[in-house]
Image: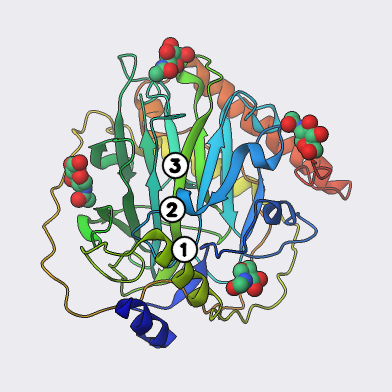
Amino acid sequence: MKSFVSLLAFPASSLAGTVLWSGIFNSSATVADFDDWSWSNQIEPWQWYIYGTGNTSEYLGLSTDFKNPADTSDAQGLRISIDGTSFWEGQTMERSELIPQTTADLGSGHLYYHFSLSTKTTNAPNASFEHQIAFFESHFTELQYGLASGASGSSDNTLRWNAGGETQWSVQLEAGNWYNFAYDIDFDAQTVGLWASNGSDPLTEVVSPVSASASSNSADWHVGELRLPNGGSNDAAEDWYWSGIYIEEAPITKEIGSGSSSSSSSSSADASSAASSVSSTSSSTSALPESTAEASSTSTTASAATTVTSTTAAVQTTAATVAPSVASSVTTSSVSTAAAAVTSAVAPSATIEVASTATASAAVLPTPTTATEVLDDIRALFSALISRSSGNHARDFARRG
Ligand SMILES: *[C@@H]1O[C@H](CO)[C@@H](O)[C@H](O)[C@H]1NC(C)=O
Ligand SMILES: *[C@@H]1O[C@H](CO)[C@@H](O)[C@H](O)[C@H]1NC(C)=O
Ligand SMILES: *[C@@H]1O[C@H](CO)[C@@H](O)[C@H](O)[C@H]1NC(C)=O
Ligand SMILES: *[C@@H]1O[C@H](CO)[C@@H](O)[C@H](O)[C@H]1NC(C)=O
């Protein structure tokens, strides 16, 4: 308990870097909160419009059981699921994706995009399909899981991190393990690296920054999963578990949750109560988000095309699995994520989100599905534009349930 007392006493200034945006969940958060967001009510911290035809609770769940138990900054973790109904806007891809809603500038300077990810044996993701996870609209960096579209074989249990059009790091996905990640994105230097750890271990740098076309309009980081149809069709639900989602300015916070480093002594009950106390001290000085209705359609199309032409060498590269050094005992205690200070006043533009399927693998071995997917994208984009011009956003559907 001692560590929690000191945790609570820490002022926000002891964070390693300033938290620009926080997607952590306190104990009061409910799934119904996600449905309160719409294009005409752009409340922070999450945009929720990329999902299938079912009710939100089919695709999202919140529970103390869904978080990394080592993470004491989150009171609850998030289940993001796809199933046979997850075809957004009639696309052939199954998608359930949240996007940060914020007035902060998430696309400048040197930032760390943090999240933890896990799966279970129940509703495990199907390794016969390519999954794009935690990706940006231009796909300059992302995680992927499963058989890459265009690759040979029938399944692939690899969870891999791609940047600059190549797989830079990979691991075999193990149900029940918590994978902690931070994308190290330097928008000025145009580089991206990866920090990672398992369970309660502090993050270590597993890939030094590589060159990448890093960009974000602050509303295009897709927290969730997009599954390509390359495995055929299979309606089985897939659950992915997420926690500790936040974005900070450099320097990086390496600790998971309370900063208790490798000793995950805290019970989850302690963790929850500590987290809700800490969360209540969060300060948010956000101005009302401006709702600008400019769609970045042309830039989306352009970046997808660029990705195709610039990644021709992709899949031939052997995935480099970089063994992380074992962190020796950390003596300084560093508070991580709980207090979010949203200080930037940059207004995001509302972007029409279109999934680019111009992945590295697709570029190497084009498959017939790719063209279909691109057409789906274009179709979705146009239908969104048409609805938008008539005053209703395409995804501003009538509230379900
Ligand atoms: C996590 O553990 C797996 C073995 O289960 C190992 O292969 C991997 O390198 C570890 N990852 C990190 C970032 O420590
Ligand atoms: C994954 O999907 C494929 C294609 O539908 C199917 O043949 C396979 O049985 C599924 N795998 C699992 C483990 O459910
Ligand atoms: C929980 O988080 C929500 C959304 O950030 C906030 O409005 C609410 O006040 C918080 N509740 C507690 C008990 O901290
Ligand atoms: C969505 O929720 C409503 C109200 O709870 C329910 O009537 C409806 O059947 C649900 N739809 C689906 C697809 O589950």
**Could you tell me which residue is drawn at 29 percent across and 39 percent down?**
166
* SS under mark 2: loop
Q: How is the image coloured?
A: rainbow
Cβ–Cβ below 8 Å for labels 2 and 1?
A: yes
Question: Of the residues under marks 3 and 1, which one precedes in the sequence?
Answer: 1
Looking at the rendered structure, the kind of residue marked 3 is: Ile
Cβ–Cβ below 8 Å for labels 3 and 1?
A: no
Q: Nearer the viewer, mark 2 or mark 3?
A: 2
Q: Position of residue 334 (x, y in %)?
A: 30, 78
Answer with left or right where residue 29 lies relative to residue 71: right
The residue that mark 1 highlights is: 74
Asked if 108 appears above or below 367 in the picture, the reply is: below
Answer with left or right where residue 19 lies relative to residue 205: right
**Could you tell me which residue is drawn at 72 percent across and 56 percent down?**
37
* SS under mark 3: strand
Ligand 1 positioned in quadrant: top left
Residue 347 visible in the shown view: no
**Could you tell me which residue is drawn at 48 percent across and 64 percent down?**
107
Count residues near mark 3 (Cα–Cα under 10 Å), then give few for <14, some for 14-19, many for 20+.
many
Answer with left or right where residue 342 lies relative to residue 366: right
Residue 329 numbered tag: none
The residue that mark 2 highlights is: 67
Q: Nearer the viewer, mark 3 or mark 1?
A: 1
- For marks 3 and 1, give the CA distance: 21 Å
User: Where the N terminus falls, by quadrant?
Assistant: bottom left
The residue that mark 3 highlights is: 133
Residue 228 visible in the shown view: yes
Question: Of the residues under marks 2 and 1, which one precedes in the sequence?
Answer: 2
Looking at the rendered structure, the kind of residue marked 2 is: Lys
Looking at the rendered structure, the kind of residue marked 1 is: Asp
Ligand 3 has an atom within 8 Å of the beta carbon of the residue at disc 2? no
Ligand 3 has an atom within 8 Å of the beta carbon of the residue at disc 1? no
